[in-house]
Image (cartoon, rainbow, N blue to C red):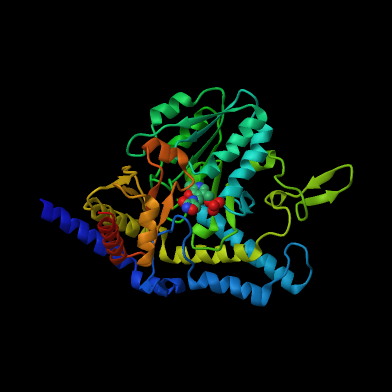
Amino acid sequence: MRAAHEMNASQAWERSRASLDVERIREDFPILKRRVHGKPLVYLDNAATSQKPKVVIDATHRYYSEENSNIHRGVHFLSEQATGAYEGARARVKRFLNASDAREILFVRGTTEGINLVARSYGRKFIQEGDDIIVSAMEHHSNIVPWQIVCEEVGARLRVIPMNDRGELLMEEYEKLLNERTKFVSVTHLSNALGTVNPVKQIIERAHRCGVPVLVDGAQAAPHVRVDVRDLDCDFYAFSGHKLFGPTGIGVLYGKASLLEAMPPYQGGGDMISAFTFAKTIYKVLPFKFEAGTPNIAGGVGLGAAIDYLDGIGLEAVAAYERELLAYATEALCTIQGLRIIGTAKEKAGVLSFVLDGVHAHDIGTILDRDGIAIRTGHHCAMPVMQRFGVPATARASLAFYNTREEVDALVAGIDKVREVFN
Ligand code: 7TS
């Protein structure tokens, strides 16, 4: 029976490997050839930021070398080219998310800014004293603090969906929190500290039955699972370019046009007004109303290239490969004495948070680093998760499609070394 199971698992692995030529893919990422402390780099910190394929590096390089100019304002050749490149990237993001209109795609600095935009603009206009905002116990601080600020300013209250010992949201508790005071729900699609993939479609459907809009924090999900904002029917969806194999300093906020149109600007400045007088300023149409000032043009161009690259590989193939690699890594880590995985949800994606008896997470990270293995240690900006599981910190290995079983083996060997040092 076990042999049959193993054969199936290994067949599945071979299938996902076959659909993804990882050795060839690794050639696309110059940094993966680096050696760190004399050892080949084993990069397992993809949830913090992912590495960039050469096509993304080349696209930003080409932009600065050949097209650099300010956008939306020049009548000259370069400005038109730069505008075309930037707006072309917006069209790619629209397709990537299956949004119905490019006006619904706002370029921001990253997930953090996307959520702050909604909290400040929507929150200040539509949330009042006595209202409730619902978040979950597994949010990154960037999906808690902006809402805390709104609550403090207007006198609203933050309610928190709890989770079970596996790190799954308690949907019955969520249902109980929803009532006529609820004015907004903001939840993560994929937890950076636990790896849990949340049933966001169900969360959205329940909120909508009460007429409540939902923001989905897609910082971790967008690079690993296919996102279809129309199928989810989310009202807002935020993600960061740098976790999606694109540049830092660029990200996306998707918002339904009807909501964005009803919201006041987030920042004022150039490129967001259609008519100005000292008495009154008329704002531009979407998306420009929310994009004051010169944006990260090269970042947008690089993000467009990252999306093209990811589309070329196929998110479905990526997800299948990472699922197999996660299963392999989970099984391998479970064989290590004294190691406990934090986050064992049934629906999980490539994050492995763990603690080791008698060893602080930072010591694990430091010792692994000597072998060229990069992981993250700490609270991962998700302190409610640490509190829920009663740990000060975890060590976290997070996977991407360019990681291999050999790298997982190196991680396991590294942790064995940590245990030897501390025994
Ligand atoms: N939301 C989630 C779920 C995240 O994981 C992160 C960053 C953010 C929001 C914020 O994204 P940013 O690009 O605006 O900074 N998470 C992590 C992490 O897990 N390690 O470093 C950053």
**Residue sitting at the far right:** 278
- Can residue 89 be seen here? The reply is yes
Q: Can see residue 218?
A: no
Where in the figure is residue 14, as x and y percent of width and height?
Answer: 25, 64
Tell me what residue is drawn at x 74 percent, y 73 percent: 77
In this orientation, which residue lies closer to the viewer: 390 or 170? 390
x and y, in percent, of residue 373 in the image: 37, 64
Number of numbered discs: 0
Look at the picture and state if 112 lies above or below 242. Answer: above
Question: In the depicted view, which residue is nearer to us: 419 or 377?
Answer: 419
Q: Is residue 146 left or right of residue 374?
A: right
Q: Quadrant of the C terminus?
A: bottom left
Picture coordinates of residue 242, whole percent (x, y): 52, 59
On the rendered structure, is 10 left or right of 105? left
Q: Position of residue 168 (x, y in %)?
A: 36, 38
